[in-house]
Image: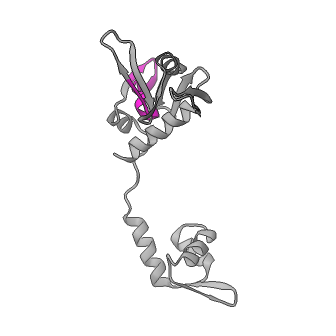
């Protein structure tokens, strides 16, 4: 069969069929400069795709499963993630008084305690809004936040992007 027919049958684009043919994902031969796709091989590939379980999506249930707390009031339905630092890869240790004793990002590179305190203040809230299915964050200049590590190096991180990526990774791991 040709690539157009194969794409319609597999419910993918023609470019995807050509890519599969080039990579050997489906058995195919090139005749007169055009791909001819083996029907049985395509059927096997479609069956493999159908067996895959769908990845968990953003929902109230998945957000609660990763540690969120549900809040409903005045027609609003949200799940707040008070532990956003875990998703952003920020590790904070505290003294019994509540002051920061040490901080690091992704388990490496110590951050000065005062800078870590300002880092925690950069993001104020992270939540999932059940009405539109989106993640939200209120922040103060958290898009391009500078981290000075104790070894003297500087890193620029996007706290919002790191947090959202961490949330999505946690949901995918469910």
Query: Measured from the top left, where is residue 2 in percent x and y?
Result: 61, 82
Magenta region, residue range: 71-92
In which quarter of the view is residue 169 placed?
Answer: top left
Q: Where is residue 63 in the image (x, y as percent from the top left)?
A: 38, 35
| 157 lies left or right of 43 | right
Quadrant location of residue 59? top left
Q: In this view, does 121 lie above or below 67?
A: above
Residue that extends furthest to the front in the rendered view of this protein: 151
- Residue at the (58%, 73%) spot, across then down: 17
Most distant residue in the bottom direction: 32
Residue furthest left in the image? 96
Depth order, front residue of 119/52: 119
Q: Taking the image as drawn, is residue 133 in sight?
A: no
* Residue 96 placement (x, y as % from top left): 30, 12
Whether the magenta-drawn stretch holds residue 76 is answered as yes
Can the viewer see residue 101 in this picture? yes
State yes or no: residue 62 in magenta. Answer: no
Image vertical order of residue 148 relative to residue 100, above or below: below
The percent coordinates of residue 154 (x first, y second) are: 59, 31
């Amino acid at each position: 069969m040709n690539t157009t027919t194969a794409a319609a049958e597999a419910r993918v684009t023609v470019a995807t069929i050509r890519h599969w043919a080039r990579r050997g994902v489906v058995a195919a031969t090139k005749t007169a400069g055009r791909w001819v796709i083996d029907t049985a091989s395509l059927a096997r590939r479609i069956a493999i795709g159908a067996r895959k379980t769908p990845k968990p999506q953003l929902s109230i249930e998945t957000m609660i499963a990763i540690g969120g707390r549900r809040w409903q009031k005045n027609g609003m339905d949200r799940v707040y993630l008070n532990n956003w630092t875990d998703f952003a890869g920020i590790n904070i240790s505290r003294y019994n008084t509540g002051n920061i004793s040490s901080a690091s990002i992704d388990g490496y590179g110590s951050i000065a305690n005062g800078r870590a305190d300002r880092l925690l203040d950069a993001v104020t809230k992270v939540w999932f809004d059940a009405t539109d299915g989106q993640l939200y964050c209120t922040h103060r200049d958290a898009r391009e936040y500078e981290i000075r590590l104790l070894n003297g190096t500087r890193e620029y991180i996007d706290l919002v992007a790191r947090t959202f990526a961490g949330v999505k990774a946690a949901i995918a791991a469910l």
